[in-house]
Image (cartoon, rainbow, N blue to C red):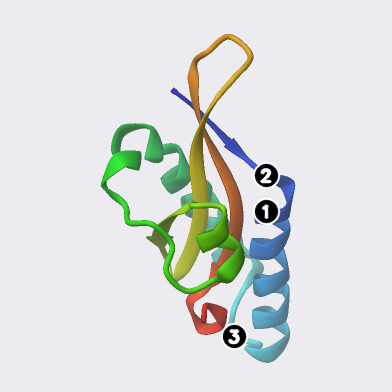
Amino acid sequence: MKVIVDDNVVKAIDDFYIAAMSRHISLSEETVMAKKKQLIASLESLKDYYFIYPKARWKDEWIKNNWQDFICEDFHFAYEVVLDKNGQEVIFVRDAVHSLLYH
């Protein structure tokens, strides 16, 4: 199964860590890059476990679209399983928000 991560998910992660680095001078770019790499790798793990995560419960857009909520490293990721043009299931990660901003 393929996992597709929307560009706005990567942007949300980048935006959060840019803000975090500006507020916490001890947070190094190396640490941020490692965290981002781990986040992307964990999204790939959805291939094996996508069916165990609950439906989103807090963000209206996520609820309205019936997306599921995957939590990793204090980020919430909204995703759905869709069929591609060949009828194969694909996991599409649609949105992301840090837990501090998820409400």
Indicate which disc, 3 or 2, sits on the residue closer to the N terminus.
2
Q: Relative to 55, does residue 7 appear above or below in the rendering? A: above
Question: Under tag 3, what secondary structure?
Answer: loop
Query: For the image shown, how many numbered marks are present on the structure?
Result: 3
Question: Under tag 2, what secondary structure?
Answer: loop
Residue contact at pointers 2 and 1, CB within 8 angstroms: yes
Which of pointers 3 and 1 indicates the residue nearer the eye?
Answer: 1
Q: Which mark is residue 26?
A: 3
Name the kind of residue labelled 3 in the image.
Answer: Ser
- According to the picture, the residue beneath numbered tag 2 turns out to be 6
Name the kind of residue labelled 2 in the image.
Answer: Asp
Which of pointers 2 and 1 indicates the residue nearer the eye?
Answer: 2
The quarter of the displayed image where residue 98 is located: bottom right
Residue occupying the point 40% across, 61% down: 72
Q: Which mark is residue 66?
A: none
Residue occupying the point 63% across, 14% down: 85
Residue 20, horizontal then vertical, whole percent: 64, 81
The quarter of the displayed image where residue 70 is located: bottom left
Q: For mark 1, does the 10 Å Cα neighbourhood hold few (<14), some (14 to 19), or many (20 or more) residues?
A: some
Q: CA distance from mark 3 to mark 1?
A: 23 Å
Residue 40, horizontal then vertical, whole percent: 53, 47
Question: Under tag 1, what secondary structure?
Answer: helix
Residue 2, horizontal then vertical, whole percent: 50, 25
Q: Relative to 34, does residue 94 appear above or below in the rendering? A: above
Q: CA distance from mark 3 to mark 2?
A: 30 Å
Q: CA distance from mark 2 to mark 1?
A: 7 Å
Residue contact at pointers 3 and 2, CB within 8 angstroms: no
